[in-house]
Amino acid sequence: MLAAVAGVFNEQGVSVETVLQSSSASAATLVIVTHLAPESALAGTVEALRSNDVVRDVTSVLRVEGL
């Protein structure tokens, strides 16, 4: 599952900085922090993740810049 999600980021040209994964018996929750990326690439990533068979839901997206 993680490889499929990472592949979506790669296809959209968004570089992953860190991943935090917690899991239960039936699902995993991922918190993904990316390097700086254009808004269009982030939007494409979220759209592709929402339509991906291994992703149950994209619960939230928070864009933070300037840290």
Image (tube, rainbow, N blue to C red):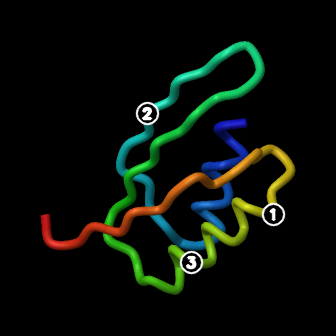
User: Which of the two labelled residues, at mark 1 and mark 3, occupies the earlier sequence position?
Assistant: 3
- Toward the top, the furthest residue is 25
**Of the numbered discs in the image, which one, if any, rests on residue 43?**
3
**Residue 48: horizontal and vertical position, in percent?**
72, 67
Secondary structure of the residue carrying numbered label 1: loop
Disc 2 target residue: 20
How far apart marks 2 and 3 lie (CA) works out to 21 Å
- Say above or below: 37 vs 8: below
Taking depth in this image into account, of 9 and 60 the one nearest to the observer is: 60
- Toward the front, the furthest residue is 59
The amino acid on which the numbered mark 1 sits, given as a three-letter code, is: Ser
Quadrant that contains the C terminus? bottom left
Secondary structure of the residue carrying numbered label 3: helix
The amino acid on which the numbered mark 2 sits, given as a three-letter code, is: Leu
**Residue 4: horizontal and vertical position, in percent?**
72, 46
The amino acid on which the numbered mark 3 sits, given as a three-letter code, is: Ala
**Residue 51, image quadrant:** bottom right
**Residue 9, image quadrant:** bottom right
